[in-house]
Image (cartoon, rainbow, N blue to C red):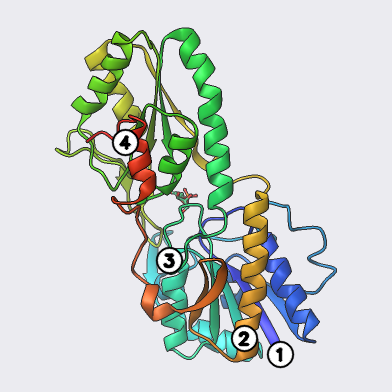
Amino acid sequence: MRIAISTGGGDAPGLNAVIRAVVLSAHHRGWRSYGIQRGYEGLLSFEGVVPLGPAQVRGITHLGGTILGTTNRGNPFRYVMRDADGKEHETDRSEDMVAAFQASGFDALVSIGGDGSLQISYELWKKGLPVVCVPKTIDNDVSGTQRSFGFDTAVSTATEAIDRLHSTAESHDRVMVVELMGRYAGWIALSSGLSGSADVILLPEIPFDIEKVIAKIRSREAAGRRFSIVVVAEGARSKDGTVELVERRGVGTVDRLGGIGSKVARAIEHFTGKETRTLVLGHLQRGGSPTTYDRLLALRFGAAAVRAIADGVFGIMVGLRGSGIEQVPLAEIVGRSKNVPLDCDTIATARELEISLGD
Ligand code: F6P
C-alpha cells in the first residue's frame, strides 16, 4: 500500500503528530507513506511529493506547524492561476488532481484539514479518490467530532493571554478588549473567556447589544471594580448591525475576519469614557507546541485513519465521539459547521457566573 498525506488550510498545533502517527502506523503494516507538500499543490505540480518513513517523522510530535507546509489557496476545484498580465483567476483542476494521484500509484489519501478541506475531500471522493479525513482546526467548528485537534492548544494560549491582561488592566483601571479567532464559531472565545474570568464574552452565536456590554462595565465600576476584560470572537456581530465584523473576500481564498475588537473598544470608550485598549491575539493562537491533549488526540486520529484504510473504508472522517474514535461518513458532515449550542451547560455556567454575553 502507498499512502499519501496532505495538510490543507490554516495550520494547527498537532498536525505533525497526526503525520507521525499515520507514517508509523502505515510502516507497522509494511506500507509506504508519502507527504504532499503545500496542500494539494505538491501533487498538482508533481514536484512536492516526498517519501516519509520513521526517520522523517522522528521527534516531531511536539512541534507546531506542519512539516509538509500548507496553504488555503490550494483548492483544486477553485485553483488560482495568474494571467500573463498578473491578474488572478480561478480554474477547476480537480481532474488533474485525481489523474496526478493515480499516476503516482497511491492507494489512499489521508487528508488532514478543516471545513474547507473536508468539502474538497468529499468532492474528490465522489470523483473516485480513496480518501480518509482527519479533523483539524483551532476553531473546533467541524461537525461529526466533539473536538478537532489544535483547539485545546489555542484555548490554552488565549486563556494565558487573558490571565496576563488582568493585572495590567487592573493597575491602569482600563477596559481591555481581546479579539480571538474562531471564524463563525465562538468555541475559543467561550472556553478561554470563561476559564480566564472575562467579564464580557461576545460570540457569533449570540448577536450582542452594545448597551448591555456598557451596562456591565458600568455596574462593575459602581461596585468598585474599575477595570474590565471583554473577550470578542472575531465572528461576533451586534444585534442591530451598528458594530459589524470586518470581512474581506478574495479570489480563491477563504473569508478573512478581523477588526471587531477595535470597533467594540471604540464604542465602549465612547459611551463609558473609560480608557479602552484592544489586543488581537491572532496567529499566536495557532502557533507553538501542541498541548498534551492535542498531541494525544492527533496521534489517535492518525492511527485511526490508517485503521480505516486497512478496513477499506473511505469517504469518511475519523471523529471523537464519547471516549472513542469513530468513522463518520463525509456526506453527513460537509457544509455543516458546528456552533456553540445556546442551551449547552458552558453557556449556562457563564450566565450563572454573571458574565455578560451581551444579550
Ligand atoms: O480556521 C483557523 C483560523 O485561524 C481562523 O480562526 C481564522 O479566522 C483564520 O484561520 C485565519 O486565517 P489566515 O491564517 O489565512 O489569516
Q: Secondary structure at mark 1?
A: loop
Q: Are marks 3 and 1 in contact (CB under 8 Å)?
A: no
Count of number-bearing discs: 4
Q: Kindly report the distance in space between the C-alpha atoms of the residues bearing marks 4 and 2.
A: 45 Å
Badge 3 or badge 4: first in the primary sequence = 3
**Amino acid type for the residue under numbered disc 4:** Arg
Residue carrying label 4:
351
Which residue is painted at 47% across and 16% down in the image? 169
Q: CA distance from mark 3 to mark 1?
A: 27 Å
What residue appears at the point 28 percent right and 20 percent down from the top-left corner? 268
Identify the residue at horizontal 26%, vertical 44% (top origin): 206
Query: Height in image: 290 above or below 27?
Result: above
* Residue at the spot of label 3: 116
- Quadrant in the rendering for residue 40: bottom right
- The image quarter containing residue 241 is top left
Say whether disc 3 or disc 2 marks the residue closer to the N-terminus.
3
Q: Tell me the distance, in whole angstroms, between the alpha carbons under discs 1 and 4.
A: 53 Å
Mark 3 vs mark 4: in front: 4
Residue 255: x and y, percent? 36, 53
Q: Position of residue 293 (x, y in %)?
A: 63, 53
Residue 282 % position (x, y): 49, 39
The first of marks 1 and 4 along the sequence is: 1
Query: In terms of sequence position, does the residue under pointer 4 or pointer 2 come before the other?
Result: 2
Query: Residue under circle 1?
Result: 1
Residue 252 in picture, x, y percent from top left: 40, 62
Using the numbered discs, state the Cα–Cα distance from disc 3 to disc 2 in whole angstroms.
Answer: 22 Å
Quarter of the image with the C terminus in it: top left
* Mark found first going from the N terminus, 2 or 1: 1
Looking at the image, do the residues carrying marks 1 and 4 touch, with CB atoms under 8 Å apart?
Answer: no
Amino acid at circle 1: Met
Mark nearest the camera among 3 and 2 is 2
Tell me the CA gap for discs 2 and 1. 10 Å
